Image (cartoon, rainbow, N blue to C red):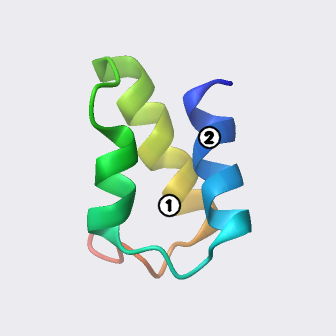
Amino acid sequence: MNATLTAKALLADNPNLTVEELAAHAAGLDTKSEDEFWAAVREVNPTLCPDW
């Protein structure tokens, strides 16, 4: 599963995940994948990280 789908699946299963919990899932991703992960997080839940 790619980083975008992972982020979307995580938030679909648990929309109340915190930034810290999401960061734990993003740990270990390469730089490009991590960027894709956080872009998907912002797409699904823009209020989670409003200042990004």
What residue appears at the point 57 percent right and 72 percent down from the top-left corner? 45
Q: Which element is circle 2 on?
A: helix
Quadrant assignment, res 18: bottom left
In the image, residue 22 sits, relative to residue 38, either above or below, namely below
Q: Which element is circle 1 on?
A: helix
Q: Quadrant of the C terminus?
A: bottom left
In the image, residue 41 sits, relative to residue 45, either above or below, namely above
Q: Are marks 1 and 2 in contact (CB under 8 Å)?
A: no
In the image, residue 47 sits, relative to residue 26, either above or below, namely below
- On the question of residue 45 being in view, the answer is yes
| Amino acid on which disc 2 is placed | Thr
Mark 2 closeness class: few <14, some 14–19, many ≥20 residues within 10 Å: some
Give the image location of residue 16, x and y in percent.
Answer: 53, 82
Q: Quadrant of the N terminus?
A: top right
Camera-side mark, 1 or 2: 2
Residue 5 is labelled as none
In this view of the protein, which residue sits in the foreground, 50 or 6? Answer: 6
What residue appears at the point 49 percent right and 33 percent down from the top-left corner? 36
What residue appears at the point 26 percent right and 65 percent down from the top-left corner? 20
What is the spatial separation of the Cα atoms under label 1 and label 2, in whole angstroms?
13 Å
In this view of the protein, which residue sits in the foreground, 1 or 4? Answer: 1
Sequence-earlier tag: 1 or 2: 2
Kindly identify which residue carries mark 1: 42
Kindly identify which residue carries mark 2: 6
**Residue 44 placement, left or right of 39:** right
Mark 1 closeness class: few <14, some 14–19, many ≥20 residues within 10 Å: some
